[in-house]
């Protein structure tokens, strides 16, 4: 019943976009979401456990142990514990709107949120994809990251700290999409820092920064090799 209600809510959100607009990446997202919901039901029947089985559900989009292998989805592995918890609460309250994460996060109690955050924070992080080298983009991206003092919030190796996320090795498409969302105001940073930084970036700058960050091996010096 709960699975059907959540899938219904997601479909309702999609319907508001307009006829014919739900396609491509959105369609694939919906298929992954429904697959995750079906898996939850199957797990419940086999184990007679309570809904949901949060960690396994996360793997469908975010990869095994939270290490995404899809450039459009963020890796949770190695993210700071406080950041993961804060984002789950933001999804639950709709402060950070997402038609898929919102319903999932709202069904988590505080204990489950803390457990998920602790689990993913302990996982070994790797790059989400192998991004081909591009000397010009690498140089431009590195220059922009240094000029905006990204390490001040995200750590010396850009692995994140406190409520600032890991940037190193995230998918290039995900990084570009989030920077664009901060720039447009679609996504809001409570401190205002990310919105302020993103507004100073052109679309070309965003592409260069995303390329550079995606090429960094997590835990290594913030230079693209």
Image (cartoon, rainbow, N blue to C red):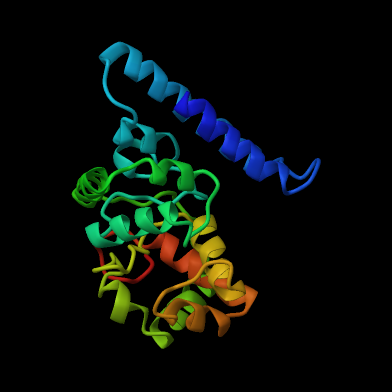
Residue 5 to residue 144: above or below = above
Residue 187 point in image, percent of width and height: 52, 67
Residue 128 point in image, percent of width and height: 41, 49
**Residue that extends furthest to the right in the rendered view of this protein:** 19
- Asked where in the image residue 30 lies, by quadrant, the reply is top right
Q: In this view, does 201 lie to the left or right of 111?
A: right
Residue at image location 44% in from the left, 49% down from the top = 129
Q: Is residue 174 left or right of residue 146?
A: right
**Image quarter in which the C terminus is found:** bottom left
**Residue that extends furthest to the bottom in the rendered view of this protein:** 147
Residue at image location 34% in from the left, 13% down from the top = 45
> In this orientation, which residue lies closer to the viewer: 115 or 167?
115
Query: Looking at the image, how many numbered discs can be counted on the residues?
Result: 0
- Asked where in the image residue 212 lies, by quadrant, the reply is bottom left
> In this orientation, which residue lies closer to the viewer: 176 or 26?
26
Residue at image location 58% in from the left, 75% down from the top = 183
Residue 161 point in image, percent of width and height: 24, 68
Residue 132 to residue 210: above or below = above
**Residue 32 visible within the image:** no
> In this orientation, which residue lies closer to the viewer: 69 or 222?
69
Residue 2 point in image, percent of width and height: 45, 28
Residue 144 to residue 62: above or below = below
**Residue 168 visible within the image:** yes
Residue at image location 26% in from the left, 15% down from the top = 47
């Amino acid at each position: 019943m709960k699975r059907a209600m959540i899938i219904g809510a997601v479909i309702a959100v999609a319907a508001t976009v307009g006829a014919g607009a739900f396609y491509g990446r959105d369609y694939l997202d919906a298929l992954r979401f429904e697959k995750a919901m079906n898996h939850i039901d199957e797990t419940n029947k086999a184990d007679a456990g309570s809904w949901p089985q949060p960690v396994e559900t996360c793997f469908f989009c975010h990869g095994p142990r939270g290490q995404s292998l899809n450039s459009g989805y963020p890796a949770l592995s190695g993210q700071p514990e406080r950041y993961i918890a804060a984002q789950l609460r933001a999804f639950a309250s709709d402060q950070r709107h997402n038609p898929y994460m919102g319903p999932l996060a709202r069904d988590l109690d505080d204990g489950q949120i803390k457990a998920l955050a602790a689990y993913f924070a302990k996982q070994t992080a790797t790059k989400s994809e192998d991004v081909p080298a591009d000397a010009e983009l690498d140089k431009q991206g590195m220059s922009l990251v240094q000029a905006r003092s990204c390490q001040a919030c995200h750590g010396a190796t850009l692995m994140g700290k406190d409520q600032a996320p890991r940037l190193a090795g995230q998918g290039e498409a995900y990084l570009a999409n989030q920077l664009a969302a901060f720039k447009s105001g679609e996504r809001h940073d409570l401190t205002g820092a990310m919105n302020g930084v993103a507004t100073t970036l052109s679309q070309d700058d965003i592409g260069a920064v995303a390329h550079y960050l995606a090429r960094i091996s997590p835990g290594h010096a913030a230079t693209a090799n």
